[in-house]
């Protein structure tokens, strides 16, 4: 990330529950956790989850060290939205679904 100044942000869809559990698992470390997903490349070369809800292609514009961590500030250069998918939501230690909004007159 520091070399390329690029990062992609992939938003998981409702069908990605097992993938989310794998990504957050302490037992699977390193690049192995990414092998079961289907990846493509953004025009910038960043990784994009093929069936993600949305993908943001970002350029890192600033970085700050906070303790043992780094905080990156990014500018979104492009976005992909798959409007047919529903989001994967994690709330109160469990995965939840969202009901569609309905217009009330």
Image (spheres, helix red, strand yellow):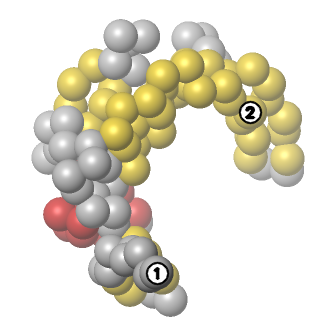
Tell me residue 2's x, y (percent): 64, 19
The image shows a total of numbered marks equal to 2
Tell me residue 25's x, y (percent): 36, 66
Q: Nearer the viewer, residue 48 or 81?
A: 81
Does 85 appear above or below 88?
above
- Badge 2: residue crowd in 10 Å (few <14, some 14–19, many ≥20): few
Tell me residue 50's x, y (percent): 19, 36
Q: Report the disc number at residue 105.
A: 1
Q: Nearer the viewer, residue 65 or 93?
A: 93
Q: Report the disc number at residue 73.
A: 2
Q: In the image, what residue occupies the spot 55% across and 19% down?
A: 77
Q: Nearer the viewer, residue 101 or 13?
A: 101
Q: Is residue 70 left or right of residue 84?
A: right
Q: In the image, what residue occupies the spot 19% across and 43% down?
A: 51
Locate residue 100: give its quadrant.
bottom left
Does 11 appear above or below 89?
above
Q: Quadrant of the N terminus?
A: top right
Mark 1 vs mark 2, CA separation in Å: 40 Å
Residue furthest to the front in view is 105
Helix, strand or loop at mark 1: loop
Visible residue check, residue 72? yes
Locate residue 72: give its quadrant.
top right
Tell me residue 31's x, y (percent): 31, 39
Visible residue check, residue 31? no
> Of callouts 1 and 2, which one flags the residue occurring earlier in the amino acid sequence?
2
Helix, strand or loop at mark 2: strand
Q: In the image, what residue occupies the spot 40% across and 63% down?
A: 24
- Badge 1: residue crowd in 10 Å (few <14, some 14–19, many ≥20): few
Q: In the image, what residue occupies the spot 35% across and 10% down?
A: 43
């Amino acid at each position: 990330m520091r070399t390329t100044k690029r990062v992609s942000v992939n938003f998981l869809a409702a069908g990605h529950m097992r993938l989310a559990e794998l990504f957050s698992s302490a037992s699977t470390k390193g690049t192995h956790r990414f092998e079961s997903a289907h990846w493509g490349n953004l025009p910038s070369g960043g990784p994009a989850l093929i069936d993600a809800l949305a993908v943001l292609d970002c350029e890192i514009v600033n970085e700050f060290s906070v303790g043992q961590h780094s905080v990156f500030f990014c500018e979104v250069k492009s976005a992909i939205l798959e409007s047919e998918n529903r989001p994967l939501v994690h709330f109160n230690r469990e995965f939840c679904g969202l009901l569609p909004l309905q217009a009330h007159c």
